[in-house]
Image: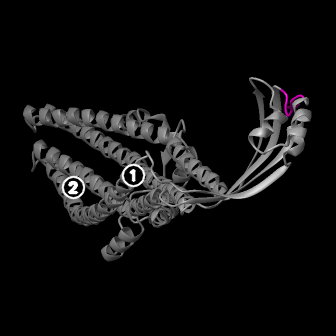
Amino acid sequence: MKLSRVVWLCLLSLPSAGYAQPISFTDAWQQVLKVSDKLQAQSQEVNRAKGEQEAGESLNLPSLDIRGSYIHLDKPIEFDLKELNSVVSIPPSLGGIIAGIPPLPLSEQDIFSASLQAMWPIYTGGQITAAQGIHAAMVAEKQQELQLATRDLFTLLVDRYYAVDVTLALVNTQTDLVGSLTKHVDHALALEREGQIAKVERLNAQVALDNAKVNLGSARRQHEMAVIALSRMLQQSQVSTNSPLFVLPQAPSFAQLSQITLSQHPALKLLEAKETQANGLIALEKGKYHPTVFLFGNYTLYEEDTLLRSITPDWMVGVGVNVPLISRDGRSGKVEAAKSALLQARYTKAQTKQDLSLLVDQSYRQLLQAEEEVKALDTSLELASENLRLREIAFNQGLSTSIDRVDAELKLSAVKTQQLAARYRYVQAYARLMAISGQLDEFIGRTIGRTQVQETNNAR
């Protein structure tokens, strides 16, 4: 009766999330993709870059403006025929007549006008093409940053999701230990009253029970924090997991992982996009040394009816050229800066390849190490279970002390805890390898298969 009461109290102390509807790792990942503010923010970065790229496409188009003006002159523009004497030779007979003619008004003192103006660049020394290439590379950069953020979030979800499973298993292990030690303490008390064991043996069992209760409380708090962390990530009030820890029957190919990582990793593609941007900046700055050729046109929409208006054409078109000679924008310095940016991107890419190669190597070795620990602990678990069974029989027959019995119990609990930790490290290492190589679906497929096996076993 005492055993069942202890177990029941321990179960009641678990967080309420334990009674939530279980969510598979696949569904949890889809939920993260849907609710993650980090991914949403990164997606908007991609959209912003795409908007700038679309804006850059209009650089090839002509510009068309309606321009209006109001001009107030010091005095109206007039034409005095007497001033012709300074230009052409006028016969004296006409000079008198011209002298009597008053100045001709050409415009008013206040001039209003409106016109339609167009300009179309037809050659810019490659500046437009370079700018458009830079915009396209910026889109690629933001897309790769989104991929990196997605992979980081994936590994974080693996850590938090399986932490719930591991801490719950640890709670169950500690609960079993408390129940077993409680039963053993009751038995030791009965033997002490009958004088079959010394008081020190019963106290040893009691101390072990008290320590187990402390560890159980710590395990419960760890589980509560794991549930809270996962629920915050999923933005759900209650969560429970049903995708168990697993160990693959065969480790993935290291050569294949390395090849995929070093050829497809988003960090490398991001740096390639930066290289493209640097090359574009070089072309853009060099293009400023070239002349700019453009078509232009003007059509007068409104102008006051004056003599000057009557002799001015309504429209005109032409070709213009602008040849830069001396500029104060530091074109040569900007070219050198762009070249340095290009070299920086290339050196960073080479270093990133080395770092990724090392990361794959480390994660793969951690995977193998965790796998070896799991297999070794399987044997240790079998040994600890058998040792506890024999110590239990020997203690009940008075052939072994309570200390031996408690030690056997603690060793079994320790082996179970170590195996949980090893399995957790294995899944973490495998998730990192799949995230580094971009094989997220491969990891998800493994969890689906394991979940279906577990549900089948539970149904049986």
Q: Residue 311 versus residue 416: which sits nearer the camera?
A: 311
- The CA span between labels 2 and 1 is 79 Å
Q: Image check: 293 left or right of 187?
A: right
What's the amino acid at mark 1?
Lys
| Picture quadrant where residue 121 is located | bottom right
Where in the figure is residue 153, as x and y percent of width and height?
A: 44, 50
Say if 397 sits above or below 114 in the image. below
Query: In the rendering, at what x and y percent does residue 41 appear?
Result: 53, 43
Magenta range:
102-108
Q: Residue at x 19, y 46 (%)?
A: 410
Q: Is residue 236 left or right of residue 103?
A: left
* Mark found first going from the N terminus, 2 or 1: 1
Residue tagged 2: 389
Instruction: State the colouring used for the structure image.
Output: one colour
- When the figure is inspected, residue 236 is found, relative to residue 121, above or below; the finding is above
Q: Quadrant of residue 322?
A: bottom right
Q: Nearer the viewer, residue 455 or 196?
A: 455
Q: Main secondary structure of the magenta part?
A: loop
- Residue 103 within the magenta-colored segment of the rendering: yes
Residue at numbered disc 1: 334
Q: Residue furthest top?
A: 74
Q: Residue type at mark 2? A: Arg
Residue 9 marker: none
> Quadrant location of the N terminus?
top left
Q: Nearer the viewer, mark 2 or mark 1?
A: 1
Which residue sits at x=39%, y=57%?
245
